[in-house]
Amino acid sequence: MRIGSPFEKVQMATIGKRNQLAIIRYAPPGLYLDGGESGEILLPRRYVPSKFSVGDYLEVFVYLDSEDRLVATTEVPLCSVGEFACLSVVSINQRVGAFLNWGLSKDLLLPFREQEKPVHPGDKAVVFVLLDEKTERIVATTRLSRHFSRETPPYKQGEQVQLMVLDRTPLGYNAVVENAHRGLLYHDKLSVPLQPGQRLKGFIRNLRPGGKIDLSLDASGYKRVATLTDRILEKLKQNGGKLPFDDSSAPELIRQSFGVSKKAFKQALGFLYKQRRINLHRPGISLNENNTFSPGR
């Protein structure tokens, strides 16, 4: 937590984000940090590190306490302002809304007005975290559509991206792409069901007019084959040069062992076979260590 010195003033502390703020002074309530135009910000005594000096920088998260005062914490939240996340509902206050566990001692409010559908204790809610313009309090919303980027998606076909599953639709699963855009994973391209809030790596399958994005959990074309071929060769080496899988293996076994579709697996085997890297035995494959062609039997 001790970031360093010398003492440099910041313009203004950012609410709902992690900030590097300099220590101004120590007092019985805790450390007072330089928030620039935001003024002094208290880091309560329970978060004060065992060693510190005036002028040192601490990395802290800044938010408003119950009395609308800026306060800092060294706790690390599960999400920050401007991010999508899946959080657990811990309680309901009938006057204001639901409270969510986001990793801080003070729970995150999901106001009734920001609930697309009512939530209940124990639910998992996919939310966007924002700063309320009127109160400057950090709140969550399940009304997600207004918070996706309206800019043209900057991705390229086949590019690997970070995804978080949002919800299930008749066509597939909506997912947020790189915490910015919405995309769709089609049911017919998936071999296993997904869960809202699940984070995983995916690929841009297609970019359509209107900023619509089709996604896949498999890379496409040569990039997919190149990555998968390396994994197949590595598994062959780890298993004494032989594997019980081939182009007739069941799709669920292929997905369980390699995490890809049967189509992708067959493409990779075809590539390796043409390169004379493997032998096909049907059933099974083996390393062609002499790199000489051996027809399947």
Image (cartoon, rainbow, N blue to C red):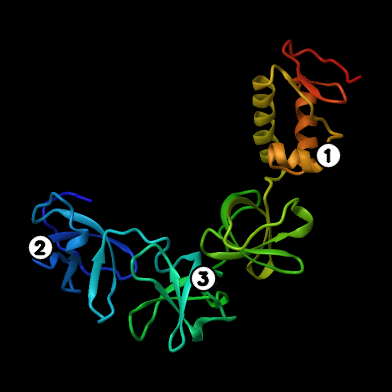
- Measured along the vertical axis of the image, is residue 92 above or below residue 261? below
- Measured along the vertical axis of the image, is residue 276 above or below residue 194? above
What is the C-alpha distance between the residues marked 3 and 1?
38 Å
* Residue for point 58% across, 52% down: 200
Of the pair 101 and 122, the residue shown nearer to us: 122
Q: Position of residue 171 (x, y in %)?
A: 76, 66
- Position of 128 with respect to 263 (left or right) is left
User: Can you name the residue that lies furthest to the right here?
Assistant: 297
* Residue for point 31% across, 59% down: 75
Q: Position of residue 146 (x, y in %)?
A: 54, 77
- Position of 236 with respect to 62 (left or right) is right
Of the pair 222 and 146, the residue shown nearer to us: 146
Q: Which residue is mark 1?
A: 250
Q: Which residue is mark 2?
A: 24
What is the C-alpha distance between the residues marked 2 and 3?
36 Å
* Residue for point 72% across, 13% down: 289
Upstream in the sequence, badge 1 or badge 2?
Answer: 2
Q: Give neighbour class at mark 1: few <14, some 14-19, many 20+ (Cα, 10 Å).
A: few
* Residue for point 66% across, 20% down: 237
Q: Position of residue 123 (x, y in %)?
A: 56, 70
Q: Amino acid at mark 1?
A: Ala
Upstream in the sequence, badge 2 or badge 3?
Answer: 2
Q: Secondary structure at mark 3?
A: strand
Position of the C terminus, as image quadrant, is top right
Q: Which residue is mark 3?
A: 127
